[in-house]
Amino acid sequence: MSLLDNTQLALESAMSGSMLRQSLLTNDLANANTPGFRPQDVNFQQTLAGALNSGQSPTSVAFTPYTQNVVNSQNGNGVNPDTVNAQIAENGLLYQELTQIAATREGILKTAMNMP
């Protein structure tokens, strides 16, 4: 039996998905001038929501990156740096919110157990 409830497990899974997305987005940005490069992304929120709705455990969710088939420059590159920078900022804020929620839940548990 796990000491963590499903909500905490889902938060941890969402944080993992957000970290994967951040890694993919920063890789996209690093390759913004690479001829023929196609950006990758992952829709971890939809994947996690689908798993939870079907009764699947959050710990068993696998996030699979996908390649976007777009071209934004004459050299065949598919990265739009302005869009990717905005996505990096948005995902960073989401990750920060997830960590704050997880920390608040941990604080509630510590208070309930009379731990300092």
Image: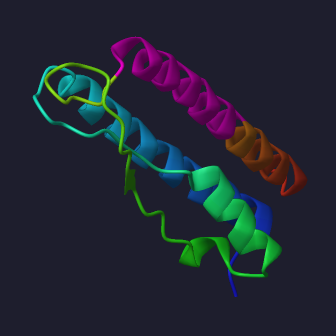
Considering every residue shown, the one lying at the far right of the view is: 112
| Image quarter in which the N terminus is found | bottom right
Q: Where is residue 67 in the image (x, y as percent from the top left)?
A: 35, 51
Considering every residue shown, the one lying at the far front of the view is: 74
Q: Tell me if residue 24 comes above or below residue 47 in the rendering.
A: above
Q: Where is residue 38 in the image (x, y as percent from the top left)?
A: 26, 40
Residue 54 image-quadrant placement: bottom right
Residue 22 image-quadrant placement: top left
Give the main secondary structure of the magenta stretch.
helix
Q: Where is residue 98 in the image (x, y as percent from the top left)?
A: 66, 39
- Residue 115 in view in this figure: no
From the viewer's perspective, tell me whether residue 98 is left or right of residue 107: left
In magenta stretch: residue 94: yes
Tell me how the rendering is colored. Answer: rainbow
Q: Nearer the viewer, residue 114 or 45?
A: 45
In magenta stretch: residue 87: yes
Residue 13 image-quadrant placement: bottom right
| Image quarter in which the C terminus is found | top right
Q: Which of 37 and 102 is in front in this view?
A: 37
Total numbered circles: 0
Which residue: 84% across, 57% down?
Answer: 113
Which residue: 70% across, 45% down?
Answer: 102
Q: Specify the segment rendered in magenta.
A: 80-100
Q: Where is residue 44 in the image (x, y as percent from the top left)?
A: 57, 54
Q: Which of 23 and 13 is in front in this view?
A: 23
- Residue 90 in view in this figure: yes
Which residue: 58% across, 73% down?
Answer: 59
